[in-house]
Amino acid sequence: MIEPGHSEIPIYRQCDLLGLSRSGYYYHPQGESPLNDRLMNLIDEQYTKMPFYGVEKMTEWLRRQGFTVNPKRVRRLVRLMGLEAVYPKKRLSVPSKEYRKYPYLLRDLAIERPDQVWCADITYIRMLHGFLYLVAIMDWYSRYVLAWELSNSLDNQFCLDAMDKALAISQPEIFNSDQGAQFTSSEFTVRLEAAGIKISMDGRGRVFDNIFIERLWRTVKYEEVYLHSYESVREARNGLARYLRIYNTERLHESLGYRTPHEVYFGEGKNNNGQAGLIHLKEPCFLS
């Protein structure tokens, strides 16, 4: 186990040796009540099915499940989980001066090869007691998950750690994300720009702008997270590591010509007919 007072091996090195992120090391169980934990788990499952549910609909749905809740409580939990309903909204807030908005570069773009476009996103991961956040960086063409990290808070560091791991493998031409504070922070965007990577950002509330990683979250939750009750960060990390390894190297994708993401990312990127694969993005698409 990690020894905070070790005179020869610093904390970050001990974390590396144990396969634990620094965010995971400093994890403490969240202070939410058992009822709020239950409500967040239900919200997560319903949001995964119906991402267009706003606070009012989610509140009414929870009431139908037998919970006495009001919109104020549901709104706080949804914000804590980092969720945003998918529907057109009025512009109710002005970004801070440090925020720099980047255009969405993928519309009408033919995605024809690995490392042409990467994407990143964060999702809520429930545990038996408390919860974590998972960030992943994926190659759009192959669906290969290049890197991921867990954290108990929505700070920047675990996203920066994941990006560093991904860039140690390769580098994309375009990096696409939503407009979350983690991805719009100067620490994040400066690293991308310094590497000569173009930055693309989704429109607010437009889940289809980052459709492939949204589909990854549904897959991870239905095939791994919802089937287990993680009791610790280590258990969650081990379970997700096992599943994402299977996802990358064993799980066949129909849209990839029944190949795995690993085969396509590190191979030639051809489908069953021997023709180069092609993703051409215009309006919302539903590729499996």
Image (spheres, helix red, strand yellow):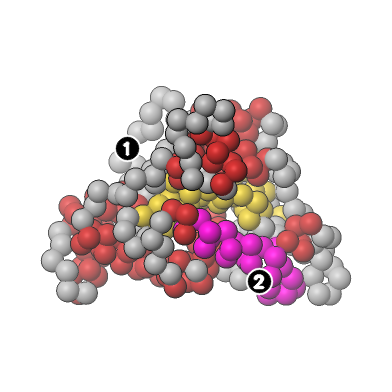
Q: Quadrant of the C terminus?
A: bottom right
Residue 199 makes an appearance in the image: no
Q: Is residue 8 above or below residue 90?
A: above
- 230 vs 265, left or right, is left
Front residue of this view, candidates 168 and 79? 168
Question: Residue under circle 1?
Answer: 93
At label 2, counting other C-alpha atoms closer than 10 Å, the crowd grade (few under 14, some 14-19, many 20 or more) is some
Point out which mark residue 109 bears: none
Residue 10: horizontal and vertical position, in percent?
A: 54, 30
- 4 vs 172, left or right, is left
Q: Is residue 212 above or below residue 11?
A: below
Q: Are marks 2 and 1 in contact (CB under 8 Å)?
A: no
Q: Which residue is at the far top?
A: 97
What residue is drawn where x is 34% and y is 52%? 81
Residue 203: horizontal and vertical position, in percent?
A: 48, 47
What is the span of residues highlighted in magenta in the rendered image?
Answer: 236-261
Q: Main secondary structure of the magenta part?
A: helix
Residue 231 makes an appearance in the image: yes
Question: Residue under circle 2?
Answer: 251
At label 1, counting other C-alpha atoms closer than 10 Å, the crowd grade (few under 14, some 14-19, many 20 or more) is few
Looking at the rendered structure, the secondary structure element under dot 2 is loop
What residue is drawn where x is 56% and y is 47%? 18
Magenta highlight on residue 237: yes
Magenta highlight on residue 83: no
Residue 265: horizontal and vertical position, in percent?
A: 75, 57
